[in-house]
Amino acid sequence: ATPLSITTATGRGARHGVLYRNAEALETAAKIDVVVFDKTGTITRGEPHVVRIAALGADGAFDAEIDDATLAAIAAAEAKSEHPLAHAVVEAAHARHLDIPECLTFVAVPGGGVRADVDGRDVVVGADRFVEDAVGADGLEQARETMRLIAQDGATPVIAAVDGRIVAVFAIRDTIKDDARAAVGALRARGIGVVMLTGDNRLTADAIAREAGIAHTIADVRPEDKESVILALQRQGRHVAMVGDGINDAPALARADLGMAMGTGTDVAIESADVTLMNGSLTSVVTALDLAHATMRNIR
Ligand code: ADP
Ligand code: MG
């Protein structure tokens, strides 16, 4: 690339959908040697859909069809949640034209799931550990093999319990962005390390990372721990960029040397970042770093 002035670089960035907060962001971007990507909504499109529901059958195995009342009760709990996985569950109930009841009480645990009282039934939906902590493990052992197969295949398993018994395992799939693999390859070709960071389980995370060409994944990370992962990399002397879209990415975006927010993401993420990638494409991560290098070569 040819050397650029800061004005030229910010102008060219803007035309490619890359907005730097200030000149310092350009300077920092030229020093980045590792890029940490959030998974959901960053590497993936952030539009997950339910591809399968394995319900508890009479034999105790998760091989049955879910009945309408059970699906409606689960959707009622998820209807109050902002989480993309919750939207997928509600969408699955809508696809069957179910009436979704109101819930009386509702609690959402970030990085875990939701719990609600639906017409007197105790409905818990979310990650296995969350459901286990909330209501115990009745049926969890039988659900595990189904969950493993779903995760190995790159989908996220979400389990649902009604009145303390696990009644269904949902397979929820989010596809990776078209340019994920190319962007990861371009970063690695420049000698930049690439890491994927997610609250999702290890098996699903590894399957998605494999698809995107990412060798290093940090999975099962609670929202409040994303920031410490960035800090740990910095303590190893790395210059860290974090790319994310969610409210739960905000502290990590702020902590990173260079926070890069997806313009398609939440306002909180954008406000915490040094660079906004307007169109949500991953190629613009590469553009942002390349423009910075071209500029700093000129200035030094
Ligand atoms: P990510 O880092 O991939 O954006 P989160 O931290 O938001 O993930 O969530 C981590 C995990 O918690 C999800 O993969 C899911 O298993 C579970 N979870 C959180 N909220 C919900 C919900 N509303 N419904 C179902 N599962 C949920
Ligand atoms: Mg996300």
Image: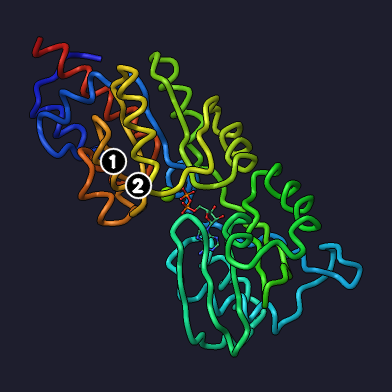
For label 1, the residue is 253
Query: Hey, what amino acid is under mark 2?
Result: Asp
- Residue underneath mark 2: 249
Q: Nearer the viewer, residue 114 or 297?
A: 114
Q: Is residue 81 left or right of residue 159?
A: left
Given residues 153 and 108, the one toward you in this image is: 108
Q: 258 or 124: which is nearer to us?
A: 124
Which quarter of the picture shows residue 6?
top left
Would residue 87 be found to the left or right of residue 99 on screen?
left
Amino acid type assigned to the residue bearing label 1 in the image? Leu
Q: Secondary structure at mark 2?
A: helix
Against 46, is 78 above or below?
below
Q: Residue at x 31, y 56 (%)?
A: 266
Disc 2/disc 1 C-alpha distance (Å): 6 Å
Residue at image point 61% right, 53% down: 173
- Dot 2, how many residues are within 10 Å of its Cα: few (below 14), some (14-19), or many (20+)? many
- Whether the residue carrying mark 2 lies under 8 Å from ligand 2 is answered with yes
Classify 300 as above or below 40: above
Residue 76 is situated, as x and y percent measured from the top left of the image, at 55, 80
